[in-house]
Image (cartoon, rainbow, N blue to C red):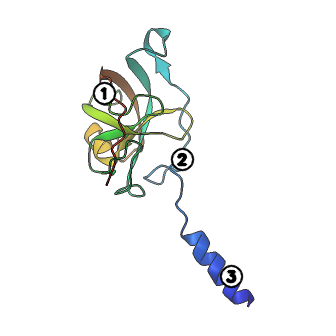
Amino acid sequence: MIAKISIILLLFLSCTVSPRYGVQSNGSTKKPKKNIKYSKKNKNSSELIGVSSWYGPNFHGKLTANGEVYDMYGVTAAHKTLTLGTVVRVTNLDNGKSLILRINDRGPYVDGRILDCSFGAAKKLGFHEQGTANVEIKIIEEGDGVYMHHN
């Protein structure tokens, strides 16, 4: 009887989804510096500077905050407060590479980070191996915040 309960408990616990915060998609557990900066000392500014990370395999094919199916190879990102659908130019301040992408999800859930890029975006920005990068975010077009419904 105890063996059956143990097996059921083990199966139940092994089926839970791990959260996106705490460990990066690349396995790194280093803690980022809390260096989020807003240009012009204004949190409503169209330019943000801080640390970006990336997320991928555990969320590939699942729904994002705006209702899209997440494609880890696409060029999208998660941000805590920017309106969903907002288009931004993200520049990796460590290597100068930049990319235009769209905010379609919420996150990151690690203190000190301002953006969670898709794996595809991180690869194009050149930080997929390091796991994080110092970035500048410039808002190009404010999103509409519309949730995509699936029938």
Whole-percent x, y for residue 71 in the image: 30, 51
Looking at the image, the residue that sits furthest to the front is 151
Pointer 2 residue: 21
Whole-percent x, y for residue 42 in the image: 48, 11
Q: Badge 1 local density, few (<14 within 10 Å), some, or many (20+)?
A: many
Mark 2 vs 1, N-terminal side: 2
Give residue 88's mark.
Answer: 1
Pointer 3 residue: 6
- In this view, 14 is above or below 19: below
Whole-percent x, y for residue 103 in the image: 35, 35
**Image quarter (top left, top right, bottom left or bottom right) of the N terminus:** bottom right
The residue depicted at 40 percent of the width and 55 percent of the height is 59
Q: Which of marks 3 and 2 is in front?
A: 3
Total numbered labels: 3
- In this view, 10 is above or below 72: below
Residue 88 position by quadrant: top left
The residue depicted at 32 percent of the width and 23 percent of the height is 142
**Image quarter (top left, top right, bottom left or bottom right) of the C terminus:** bottom left
